[in-house]
Structures are given as structure tokens and as C-alpha cells.
Amino acid sequence: MGNKQDFVIENGVLTKYTGSGGDVIIPEGVTKIGNSAFSGCANLTSVTIPGSVKEIDKRVFQGCRLS
């Protein structure tokens, strides 16, 4: 599921996910998912994006492996 410590968030922008994967829920209040935020993540099964997200940059999930 992920907890807030699994995310690097700067001024509402999710810049990096550092968790171990699984079912990830991006915290409410994030307004943008930055370039390559999930790049190279292994073992993602799902990612829930809150309604507060208004922009998703390129290559957010580049190199990810879904399990």
C-alpha cells in the first residue's frame, strides 16, 4: 500500500517513489507526478492516483515491472 515515507514530495510534486511496490496509493494533495517518479520500480501491482493530481510528466513508469 505504501505510506508517506515511501514518497519524495516537493511543493506538491511527487518526484520519487522509494517503497517496495505492491498496491501503491499516492497521497492526497499531490498535484503532479514528476518525470520518472516510479522509474525502475519492481513489484508494482497497482497505483492509485488521487483526484488532486492534475499533471503527469513523461516516463513516470519507465522501466517498471508489474507483478
Image: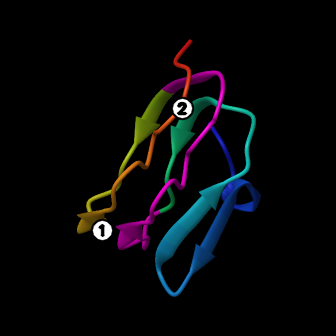
Above-or-below relation of 38 to 21: below
Q: Position of residue 6 (x, y in %)?
A: 72, 54
Q: Secondary structure at mark 2?
A: loop
Other-residue count near label 1 (Cα within 10 Å), few / some / many at <14 / 14–19 / ≥20: some
Residue shown at 44%/37% (left/top)?
Answer: 47
State the image quarter where residue 23 is shown. Answer: top right
Label 2 amino acid? Gly
Residue 40 in magenta? yes
- In the image, the segment drawn in magenta is 28-45
In the rendered image, the quadrant that contains the N terminus is: top right
Q: Position of residue 60 (x, y in %)?
A: 43, 49
Q: Residue furthest bottom?
A: 11
> Which secondary structure type mostly characterizes the magenta part of the structure?
loop
User: If you read the primary sequence from the N terminus, does the residue marked by circle 2 or circle 1 appear first?
Assistant: 1
Label 1 amino acid? Ser
Residue carrying label 1? 52
Residue shown at 73%/50% (left/top)?
Answer: 18
Foreground label between 2 and 1: 2
Residue closest to the eye, 33 or 23: 33
State the image quarter where residue 39 is shown. Answer: top right
Above-or-below relation of 27 to 12: above
Residue carrying label 2? 63
Residue shown at 56%/21% (left/top)?
Answer: 65
